[in-house]
Image: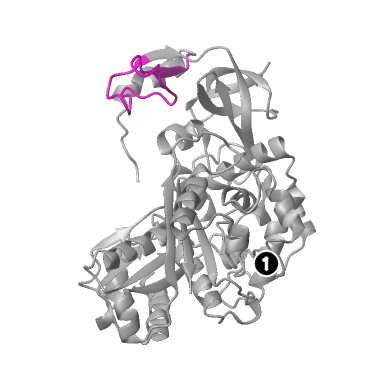
Amino acid sequence: MQELAFEAVDEALKDAGLTQDNIDISIVGCAGTRSYELMPAVPVNEYCGFAGKGPVRVEAACATGSAAIYVAYTSIVSGIADVAIAIGVEKMTEVETAVSLAIGGRSGNYLWEFHQYGTTFPAYYAMHATAHMAKYGTTEKQLALAAVKAHRNAAKNPKAHFQKEITVEDVLNSRMIAYPLKLYDCSPISDGASAAILASEEKVEELGLDAVWIEGIGYSSDTSNMTRRESFVGLKATVDAAKMAYRMAKIDNPLNQLDLATVHDCFTIAEIMAYEDLGFCRKGEGGKFIESGESDFGGKLPVNTFGGLKAKGHPLAATGVAMVYEIVKQLREDAGSLQVDLKIYRALTHNVGGTGHFCWVFVFGR
Amino acid sequence: MRHKIPVTKTVKYWKGLEEGRIYKTICRKCGREYHPPQTNCSFCGRETEWAEVNGEGIIETFTTVHAIPKGFEWSGPYTIAIASFGNVRVMGWAENVKVGDRVRAYTAKDESGVWKIYFEVI
C-alpha cells in the first residue's frame, strides 16, 4: 500500500514542483479492512516522506478521498497549514471476492442487516435499482448505457482499470450479481492511489502553482439501516450535499453552470440517480437523461470523462481524490483526447460513501 | 476476527424472533418508532417501550443476491426484501416478491441456525 501511495504522491509533488519539505500536513484517507496494515496512515506517511507530518487517518467509506480533501482544506483555511497533501489509497485485492463482498455488506450495518440477511454493497444498490425501475419504469438497458459510456471513455484513459470498450449486449448478458445488477453494472474491486496538493492563495502565488480553486463544498450523511431511509429511489445525502455546495458556489442551474462533472457510479443505477439528485434532470428521468446523450461528450454536461468508477476502477479511498485529479486536468485543459470544451471553467465532483451513507460534493473553478 | 457482541439492551428482540414475535420500540414522549429496536430514543433521551410489529406489510423493494458473501456460502441465491409496516420498515428474506406485494412477516431459523424474519406474499 505504501508503495502504491508513493506513486501518486511522487506524481503530485513533481506536478507542483515541490518536495516533502514544502508540505505542512499529510492527510491519509483509507477505508481499509481489506488490506493488511490495520492503521494505514502511519506506514503510508513513513514511506512517502511525511513521518512527523501525518497526525490523522480519514475514513468516510467510499467517500474517504473527498473527506481527506476536506480535512486538508480546513487545515489551510484555519491558518495552521499553508500547504497540505491529501492522499487516498486503497488495496482491495488482498482478500478473496467473497470476503470483499462480506466486508462491503458489513460496512452498511453488521448487527441488524449483514448478520441475518447477508447484505452486500451490490445488494444495497440493487434494491435502489428495483425501486427505481418499479416507480419510474427505468430499464436495465438504460442502466447499461452508463457502463458503456464509462468503458468508451476509459479506453482513452491510461490510468483506468479497464481500457476496453463494451456493448449494451455485453452488459445485459453478464452474470447476475444482485438482481437486477449484473457484473457489468458493478464497478470492479480495484487497488489504487491518488494524491492532491492544496495550498493557500498566498502560497499559490509565492510558489507559482497552476491552481484550480475549491468554490463550493457540500456534505451530508444518512442512516446506517436501510429500513430507516426515507426512500429507495435516490440518495438523500446527495441531494443535501449538492444543495449546500450549490449555495456556496452560487449555482442554481447546474446543467448550464458547469462544464463537466464526475459522479459516483459505483453501480450503473448510482449514476442514473446522481443525475436526478444533483439536479441535472428531474427525479425519475435519469434513464431518459442518459439516453439523450447530454451526459456524454457533445452533450450539455459530460459526466465521468475519466471512465467513471465502473471502468476507471473504484479503489475506495482513492476515488474521491482521483475525481479531483480528473477535474484539475480538465480545467487546466490538459486532458488530451478526453478534453471537454470548456465555456465556464467550472466542474463538480460527487463522491458517495456506502449507499448514500456519506456524500461529498465539491465545485471547482479556474 | 471474532467478536462477542453484547445484546443485553435488545435481548427481547432476539429472543422474540425465537418466539415468532417481531418487536419494534416506541418513544411515548415524541412518538418516534424504531425498527430495528433501540432502548434509547435518540432525540428525547427517554427510554422507549417495546411493541410488536403486526399485520400486513407492503414490499417496497427487494434484490436476489447471486454473488454470495463469505458467511453465507451454505445458501444458494437468497432474496432480501424491505417491507413497510405502518411507521416502520422491516428487512427480511422472501421468495417470489414484487414491489407492492402485500406480505405477512414470520420468523424462522435458517439452515445455519440464525433466526431471522421472512415475508410471505398474502
Residue reaching furthest right? A169
Is residue A227 depicted above or below A348 in this figure? above
Name the residue: 37% across, 69% down.
Answer: A87
Magenta residues, as a range? B21-49
Q: Report x, y in % for residue A59.
A: 36, 55
Q: Quadrant of residue A153?
A: bottom right
Is residue A3 depicted above or below A89 in this figure? below
Secondary structure at badge 1 equals helix
From the image, tell me which residue sits under label 1: A151
Q: Main secondary structure of the magenta part?
A: loop
Name the residue: 48% across, 58% down.
Answer: A250
Q: Report x, y in % for residue A289.
A: 71, 53
Q: Nearer the viewer, residue A41 or A216?
A: A216
Whether residue A89 is visible to the viewer of this picture, yes or no, is: yes
Q: Examine the structure image and report whether residue A70 is included in the region drawn in magenta.
A: no
Q: Report x, y in % for residue B49.
A: 35, 14
Is residue B14 depicted above or below A165 in this figure? above
Q: Report x, y in % for residue A248.
A: 43, 57
Whether residue A62 is visible to the viewer of this picture, yes or no, is: no
Q: Examine the structure image and report whether residue B22 is included in the region drawn in magenta.
A: yes
Split into 4 quadrants, where in the image is the N terminus of chain A?
A: bottom left
Q: Chain of mark 1?
A: A
Q: Amino acid at mark 1?
A: His
